[in-house]
Amino acid sequence: MSNPIGQLNKIFESRIRIGIMSALMVNDAVNFNDLKMLIDVTDGNLATHIKTLEDNGFLKVQKGFIGRKTNTLYSITKAGEKAFRAHLDALEKIIKGLS
Amino acid sequence: MEHDNKEATLETLQDIRSIMDRSARFLSLSGWSGIWAGVVALVGSYIAYGWMQQPDYKYMRASLSDGSLSYFDPFVFRIILLALSVFIIAFIGGYYFTYKKAKSQGLKLWNGASRQMLMQLFFPLLAGGIFTMFFIYYGSGIFVAPACLVFYGLALVGASKYTLSDIRYLGMLEVALGCFNLFFPGHGLYFWAAGFGLLHILYGAIMWNKYDK
């Protein structure tokens, strides 16, 4: 049996990225401010982690407007969902394997 | 070493769960909001009951006719005004208690989940409001209370997906009560008081005990 720790996705080692992915898993789309409130991070920090996830093809960005204000929405991609589920499975195996 | 790993993993899973819950559901709904709404509804019902003991309450039992505008007479207008006041006072108080709870939790009242919840809530309520108005317009007062209860119940069932899931059962009870009312035409006020008054107080108390205490 392979070691489940090896199956953990390095990209999801950051708590903030885990938080972003968790929110996107259960919502069609989430805007920047809601994500910020949920995860409790600074703008810059959140933007950096969103960029990493986007570069990996795990989330997609839709820029929109509400009146004159920009409203950027983030949603999860198929690849992102698959990767995050695999990561959750690995976490589960770690718990089960050690109990 | 292995123990640390497990601890960290458990913590991560709890984080994920908490964020999923908080982002998809509006969890700051206060039990006091329900209790407040229930008390206001009971007071409103009591006032309406008093009015209906007076002799000028004869129109509600008038047999169906051509649906002329005469049904919107001053007495009916007074009842409608009372019902609207009850709704507004219940809503403002409910908003206040939920606002207080969200603030104490350090959460925003207006987020993706609460927007979804309000959308789900207001769409059926709007339809219910239109139905109720037309029942009154056509002189079919006996359907007012059942329609209020059924539409409100369906609104709660729909909204429960975006807030505390217990609301779902409150909604189902309201729908059941509304249907049950159809077997007892003319006793709508009692069913209205039970559904909007007693059930709200009961549910508010249960929610308070479960989440607020």
Image (cartoon, coloured by chain):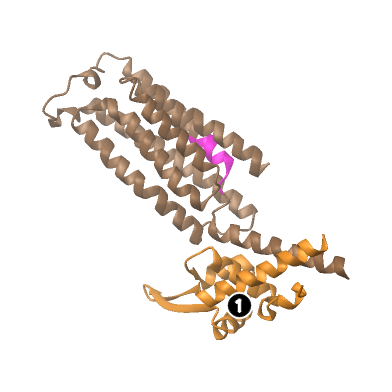
Chain colours: A orange, B brown
Q: Main secondary structure of the magenta part?
A: helix
Q: Amino acid at mark 1?
A: Leu
Tell me where residue B135 appears, x and y as whole percent.
Answer: 23, 33
Q: Residue at x 88, y 71 (%)?
A: B1
Disc 1 element: helix
- The answer to whether B7 is drawn above or below residue B167 in the figure is below
Residue depicted at 26% across the width and 26% down the height: B141
Check residue A46 for magenta coloring. no
Work out whether A76 lies above or below B195.
below
Q: Quadrant of residue A9?
A: bottom right
Q: Is residue B101 left or right of residue A91?
A: left
User: Which residue position holds label 1?
Assistant: A46
Q: Quadrant of the C terminus of chain B?
A: top right
Magenta region? B29-37
- Kindly identify the residue that appears in the image at 62 percent across and 62 percent down: B19
From the viewer's side, name the closer residue of B113 and B58: B113
**B34 in the magenta segment:** yes
Q: Quadrant of residue B185?
A: top left
Between B151 and B47, which is closer to the camera in this rendering? B151
Chain on which label 1 sits: A
Question: Mark 1 packing: few (<14 Cα in 10 Å), some, or many (20+)?
Answer: some
User: At which x and y percent is residue A98?
Assistant: 82, 63
Asked whether the viewer can see residue B41, the reply is no
Q: Is residue B180 left or right of residue B136?
A: right
